[in-house]
């Protein structure tokens, strides 16, 4: 029997809160702690009766801020019904670190890629991208737990007042993005795309859209592209929805109060969320960044993906069950190796 869930419920499905305490579990044993093992076992038994599982498709769990309590973070994720987590690399070193974590924890999978900021640095160092892309290829082929290429894409946002992303930086970002699209096609892996526009603009989204539209082989390769931490406005979203291989992933910034953002007001993002069909939807935390409003300013972690799903359920007028079931099905469709 499927239980009808209250999308506003603070627990996973509005039936029962999980109460397994990490403090009662023994300490680590090699590779995976007993704490995590028993929590996984409990999660499987309990959630098989009452819950659907969820997956956080975008984390950075290799960050040093997790070094002191990474096992506890994973325990809290399992207690919240988070079955698996994807660890996303943004540099060559971070991509290697992502794979190392997946070798230690069965529930983790890696995506390897080069963030657009990586290419900005190459401009300053006056380097080309060929050697970096070949190194990324080697990393991607080094483990069966690599399930995607990225995050890669375009980022035109200037963090310092009065500065801009130069034309040369934009050109190298595009070159790096195109090279990673080619790599994803060669390795038959999905693409996780970072997209951030100039303040008050949608320029990076428009450029990504143009690149994806012009590469007709993306459709023939059946290469799914996931727009991570999506913040596009309704106009550009309509255009992305015309590309059947594009998916949309949202973070907890959708829980923040209405205010001016990169794409206008938060209400614009709410309207964007309303537009996304369940079959094109993912949820993520992007942790340690972008903690939900309830924990704003704190380190984020995978268990918070639940709040993202709850917010989407409210915006779309769905149940939390609907969001969980759809996103899990989308994971099975897009990430066939998981």
Image (cartoon, grey):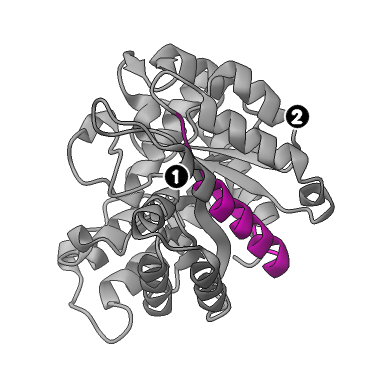
Viewer-side residue, 122 vs 50: 122
Residue at the far bottom in the pictured view: 30
Name the spot of residue 58 as percent of width and height, x first: 44, 51
**Magenta part of the chain:** 173-197
Q: Is residue 140 visible?
A: yes
* Among the 4 quarters of the image, the one containing residue 103: bottom left
Q: Residue at x 43, y 54 (%)?
A: 119
Residue at the far front in the pictured view: 126
Which residue does the numbered mark 1 point to in the structure image? 169
**Crowding near pointer 2: few (<14 within 10 Å), some, many (20+)?**
few
Q: Quadrant of the N terminus?
A: top right
Q: How many marks?
A: 2
Q: Residue at x 74, y 37 (%)?
A: 213
Name the spot of residue 217 as percent of width and height, x first: 81, 51
Taking 156 as reference, is 182 above or below it? Answer: below
Q: Is the stretch drawn in magenta largely helix, strand or loop?
A: helix
Q: Residue at x 58, y 52 (%)?
A: 175
Name the spot of residue 22 as percent of width and height, x first: 21, 62
Q: CA distance from mark 2 to mark 1?
A: 29 Å
Which residue does the numbered mark 2 point to in the structure image? 242
Mark before the other along the chain sequence, 2 or 1: 1
């Amino acid at each position: 029997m499927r239980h009808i869930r209250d999308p506003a419920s603070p627990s996973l499905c509005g039936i029962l809160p999980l109460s397994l305490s990490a403090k009662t579990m023994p300490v680590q044993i090699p590779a995976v702690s007993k704490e995590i093992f028993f929590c996984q076992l409990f999660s499987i038994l309990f959630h098989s009766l009452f819950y659907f599982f969820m997956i956080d498709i975008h984390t950075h769990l290799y960050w040093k801020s997790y070094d002191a309590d990474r096992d506890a973070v994973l325990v809290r994720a399992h207690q919240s019904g988070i079955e698996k987590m994807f660890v996303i690399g943004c540099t060559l070193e971070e991509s290697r670190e992502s794979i190392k974590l997946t070798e230690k924890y069965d529930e983790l999978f890696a995506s390897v890629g080069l963030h657009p900021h990586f290419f900005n640095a190459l401009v300053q160092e006056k380097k080309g991208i060929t050697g970096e892309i070949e190194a990324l290829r080697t990393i991607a082929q080094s483990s069966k737990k690599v399930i995607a290429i990225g995050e890669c894409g375009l980022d035109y946002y200037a963090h310092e007042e009065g500065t801009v992303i130069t034309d040369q930086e934009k050109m190298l970002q595009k070159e790096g993005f195109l090279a990673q699209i080619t790599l994803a096609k060669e390795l038959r892996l999905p693409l996780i795309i970072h997209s951030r526009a100039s303040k008050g603009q949608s320029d990076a989204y428009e450029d990504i859209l143009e690149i994806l539209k012009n590469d007709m082989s993306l459709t023939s390769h059946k290469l799914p592209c996931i727009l991570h931490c999506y913040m596009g406005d309704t106009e550009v979203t309509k255009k992305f929805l015309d590309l059947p291989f594009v998916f949309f992933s949202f973070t907890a910034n959708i829980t923040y109060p209405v205010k001016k953002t990169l794409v206008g007001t938060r209400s614009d993002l709410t309207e964007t969320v309303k537009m996304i069909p369940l079959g094109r939807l993912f949820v993520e935390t992007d942790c340690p960044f972008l903690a939900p409003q309830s924990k704003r300013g704190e380190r984020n972690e995978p268990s918070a993906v639940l709040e993202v799903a709850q917010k989407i359920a409210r915006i779309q007028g769905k149940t939390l069950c609907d969001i969980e079931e759809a996103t899990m099905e989308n994971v099975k469709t897009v990430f066939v190796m998981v």
